[in-house]
Image: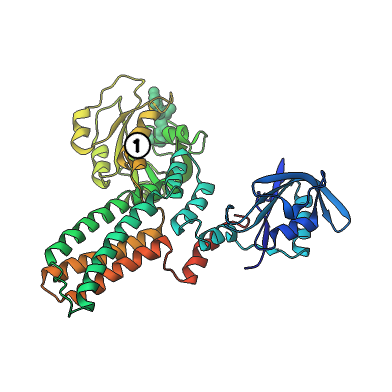
Amino acid sequence: MSTIAAISTPNTPGGIAVIRISGENALDVAEKIFIPAGGKNVSEMKGYTCAYGCAYDEKERLDDCILTIFRAPHSYTGEDTAEISCHGGLYVTKRILRAALKNGAVNAQSGEFTKRAFLNGKIDLTQAEAVMDIISAKGEKELRIAENLREGATYKKVKGISDDLMNMLGSLAAWTDYPDEDIPEVEPGYLLANLEAVRVRLESLIKNYDSGRLLRSGISTVIVGRPNVGKSTLFNCLSGCERSIVTDIAGTTRDAVEETVKLGDITLRLIDTAGIRQTFDKIEKIGVSIAEQAISSAELVIAVFDGNKDISEDDINIINKINLINSIAVINKSDLETIIDRGILEKYFKHIVYLSAKENNGIDKLKEEIEDIFMLNEKFFQDATVANERQKKCIDVCIDNVNKAIHAIENGEMLDAVNVLIDYAEQSLLELTGEKITDAIVNEVFSRFCVGK
Ligand code: GDP
């Protein structure tokens, strides 16, 4: 494999930048462009040691640097690796990279260092994907999921299931391949019990998938309610700025306004909608219809009610338009006297929060309820889960084949047919961990990485 080089730090000025060189000739390249101040010989440096010195482009002195050496296989990529830390200026960093390229290295492709770690057996494919998740994590929860994945929690679970399928395949092969030997026929009951157990474990791996996905992509959320209950005030309170028009004249918010807001670690893709009510105003009518569309496609609905007023017919009309599964009733204006009949709301909503949008009170409770709805609680982090659509697809294919194998046994089909289905199930798990995978999929996974990682 060629020796690759790239700038591993962001493409922006900073305190320090790192140029990473990896491959068979990494140390030769480093030796040609870096001279240690203390007279050390780069090619004789041990792994995990550093040298202070200077980077050069031929005779031109470029910068004072630190060179760190990693010896194969004890490096990130599993290959000999040299990392040059220089001052974090864009020009000087690019010059050092250019010097490395002049002296035998080639430009690394996106994610190529991690791809090599995978190809050299340092990590499985789920752990490689976790590296990118760590880099793109926007909060503690996302980071914890990515860390679990990187530590191999998902890999270990998948490997355990894969080993069980292998055992079944082994028993079936022994019986079908050596018909003359006195090997007892595989009991369908044994296969059924094992396949059922495998299915339960597979289902537990994908049960939290949607929660993780929503944590990464944000939850599309609409705030609904009749005019003047405080939707815009709540929207502004969540987004921390005055984006919607807040007035006490009913019907002033006419189009859907979108904003991404962070509520702790949760990202809400908030859509503020026109107050829904019976209206004869043409423009307001358009706003109302936008609101109705937003409600039907939202992943979370926050239905706002004025706690200082009785529930009206308009409130009930709105409740009837919402998918109540992922919805929260917010009883707003809790700073005023509470008049609203909570009992009526309890008939419709499992999650009810008292809040004063005007005084920014009760937002923490709203956050807790959202975490509860999407199961983003402690339990979520204890369970290994699949992290992306690729992994989810592999588990789906596996479950599908396990189900087919179960039906085949129940219908008394030949064990040869069952064998094929279990084999398909096994193959999809090997694809998930990357043990058996096409180059196209590997390239696709790593193309999403940044250069230098
Ligand atoms: P929308 O039509 O539902 O978007 O309602 P607005 O956000 O425009 O608010 C309507 C009126 O209610 C404004 O005068 C707000 O200041 C007031 N309001 C909103 N939230 C609260 C609250 O929590 N407490 C009190 N006392 N007034 C509020």
Q: Residue at x 28, y 56 (%)?
A: 202
Classify residue 95 by image quadrant.
Answer: bottom right
Image quadrant containing the N terminus: bottom right
Q: In this rendering, would 278 be left or right of 187? A: right
Quarter-of-image position of residue 432: bottom left
Q: Nearer the viewer, residue 48 or 296?
A: 48
Q: Which residue is mark 1?
A: 378
The figure's colour scheme reads: rainbow
Q: Is residue 386 visible?
A: no
For label 1, count other residues whose C-alpha is less than 10 Å away and answer few (under 14), some (14-19) or many (20+). few
Q: Nearer the viewer, residue 369 or 93?
A: 93
Residue 84 appears in the figure: yes
Return the x and y of residue 144 as percentages of the image width and height: 44, 41
**Residue at x 43%, y 69% (from the top left corner):** 437
What SS does tag 1 mark?
A: helix
In the rendered image, the quadrant that contains the C terminus is bottom right
Picture coordinates of residue 451 (x, y %)?
62, 58
Q: Is residue 446 left or right of residue 217?
A: right
Give the amino acid at mark 1: Glu
- Give the residue drawn at x 63%, y 55%: 452
Q: Quadrant of ligand 1?
A: top left
Task: Determine whether the beta carbon of the residue marked 1 sits less than 8 angstroms from the nearest atom of ligand 1.
Answer: no
Q: Which residue lies at the image location 13% right of the left edge and 67% below the top edge?
A: 188
Foreground residue among 400 and 363: 400
Left or right: 300 in relation to 178:
right
